[in-house]
Amino acid sequence: MILSIAVQAFPTPSCIAQKQDRTEPADQPVTVKKISVTGNRSLSKEEILEVISTSKKDIFNQEVFNRDIALIKKLYTFKGYFDATVDASVTTDEKKNRVELSILIEENSPARIDTVRYEGIDSITATLKKQYLEESKLERDSVFTVDHLIEERDRTVDFFKEYGYAFMHEDSIRIQVDTTGLFAGLQTNISLPKVLEYGSLQVVVHDPLTKDTAEVIPQQKNIRLDSIDIVQHGRQDISSELITNYTAYRPGDTTSLSLERKTLQNFGSTNVFSSVFIRKDSVREGKLYTSIHLEPKPKHLIEPKIYFDNRYGSLFAGASVGYENKNLFGGAENLKVTTDFGMQLSTSNDLLNNLDESLYSKYRPYEFAFSANITKPELKKPGNIYAGTLEYSRSRLPILLDNQKGLFRLSYNAQLSKKSRLNFDFFELELVKKDSLDGFKELFKTDLAENIGVDPTDPVAVDNSLDSLLQTNLNQTFRLQYFYSNQNDPLRETDETIYTWNITLEEVGGLVYLIDEYIDTKSYTGFTDDEPQIFGTPYSQFLKASGQFTFTKDLTEQQQIAGRVFLGAMAPYGKADATPDERRFYAGGPNSMRGWQFNTLGPGGNKSEATATLGADIKIETNLEYRLKFFKLFGQPSGIAFFTDVGNIWDRNGPYALTLESLYKDIAWDAGIGLRVGSPIGPFRFDFAYKLYDPTQTEPWQLSNWSPGDFTFNFGIGEPF
């Protein structure tokens, strides 16, 4: 793009008036104490300071500052303020060898666009011309800025590339600007290249381990399918059907920028290729001959990890090993197998403080998990994925319980738009088995029974509740998840707020209920006809809904504000009268209410942390963080965060049910400060939170009892939201 601006020569920047013009000795450098900016209305102080070299605490240099004033004047010219004046003053503090800089701006009125003309587009169709002019970034009576000229140049290039002008580029456009006083006339001269259509197309799959040389030609595989020539080097085995379906254009099509971008996005979505690019090879007789080059990632990946946190209060350490196959059968199927094991390093357990140590044996809580997941892209609809998951886990919890879970899930994930996806778990079956350890019955009577409406002095009621809590349970689930985010939106401005919506709806037990009613009609010992069971195994029936909204806003390059709002509720239906604890909501921990340890808050004003580990059916929570990065460690941006969390979980009924009164009285509140140490896998978080309002206490407001050492520590990896 050639930019011609016919205006009178701009006056040179105003001379800098110094209240004290003294030359400092060379051995006593003068530093900048403060930079103030006044008179600016259209541009923020941050925008102005970004273009200058002088900054606070720097050694003051008069020549550099003079150039900075000229740059500010140039910035205002680019923004259309041709008559803006920029003055400056320097105040020197001789005793402390410091200066205060004042930048004085008088913006005056901006230039406005009074005429817009386009030349060189008479050869295109009337329909295309109308569409091009309607989408123009240059509008009459708008403020003239160079930014708008650049946007119009880029729009023009992309617009004509979309309609066959494949070799349209910046030098094809010349924008002339003629200014008179406070008005600017614009004329855009466009030199259009020839319209092209695609010629023959070749897709080349390279070997990531060897070069495509003559020595490896015998290993080259060639095939022609759907007008596309496919060449695969080495031992690569990428499905030809996948290649043709994911290539969005064909020979004979008019060249199109969006079709080429769609092709790149399609292949990128498979997670199989490390590099995808389209090369324009030649032009002959109005045809553009192109080739698509695919460089696969290594097919096999083994990834070991270690992790540390304090999920149960004391230090918890673990390790995991993952294996990934990125192209299992040639159709971009991705197989990932992971196993991990973690254990608390001490036997300390605050959840058993109310239990006599002679009633149980001390142990270290642990967790073991194995999972296998396979995904397969849908060939006819690039971006959509089928998935299958198999999981097994076993954990020994700090409340004298041993849990085992097995799960099988089939899912379909569809891309609705560039910013939204829909996931449907159309089949999920989970089997949960619980066993109690020595002392659990006593713990149930001392800490749990009263909090869940059971009389601890009634042995029959206690035994019935234990049988219900510890029985093997089946959860059959249909789940629908909607995800919307502007994070990857190509039209999003760099300083625009990033926001995400995540909505989940679950129906559990519907399919097995039909089996119970119409297929398995037998009677089983220990069950009545009104209890949910199939083949002698109890099953759950409930509905669950949750929604989460998160946002992050960059205030500056080093400052960010982030927040989250979460709402969730669930309720049993049909034959069930309760929800399973493994699917309830929880509060407390490094990614929740940080003033409390992992899953130890609630429900409502409940004082027993052991009861909190059984969860509740309703959750309301909101979190807010201010993040500040001001140093680097191991080359990674690091800093601190100030945060606050508000929320709790509640039962549907009983003493800890959610009501308007309990919402007011039992909403928990904490605030604190955290250290953020950057790493390639995300920041290490060391959070120190103080309870401001604790609904479990007789006097819930904790400000009067505050002490610096009375904090809750939580550790995590990655941002909490």
Image (cartoon, helix red, strand yellow):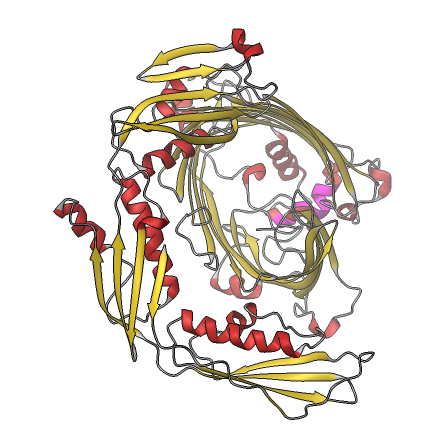
Q: Nearer the viewer, residue 396 or 637?
A: 637
Whether the magenta-drawn stretch holds residue 295 is answered as no
Residue 355 in view in this figure: yes
Classify residue 140 as left or right of residue 35: left
Q: Is residue 195 left or right of residue 540?
A: left
Q: Is residue 52 above or below residue 400?
A: below
Q: Quadrant of residue 561?
A: bottom right
Quarter of the N terminus within the rendering = bottom left
Q: As drawn, which residue projects farthest toward the bottom?
A: 19
Q: Position of residue 682 (x, y in %)?
A: 65, 46
**Up-down: is 154 above or below 708?**
above
Residue 449 inside the magenta-drawn segment: yes
Find residue 455 and report its horizontal and vertical position in percent: 64, 46
For image coordinates 26% across by 48% down, the residue present is: 191
- Residue placed at 32% from the left, 47% from the top? 157
**Which residue is more in the foreground, 698 or 296?**
296
What span is in magenta?
443-451
* Location of residue 115 with respect to 511 vertically, above or below: below
Residue drawn at (45%, 20%) of the image = 204
Please tell me whether the stretch drawn in magenta is mainly helix, strand or loop.
helix
Query: How far across and how far down the image is residue 391, in percent?
Result: 59, 25
- Give the camera-side residue of 210 and 476: 210
Left or right? Give the position of 708 relative to 258.
Answer: right
In the image, residue 451 sits, relative to residue 702, either above or below, namely: above
Q: Among all residues in the image, which is located at the extreme left?
A: 126
Residue 260: give x, y in percent of width and height: 36, 34
Which residue is found at the position 42% from the left and 53% from the top?
492
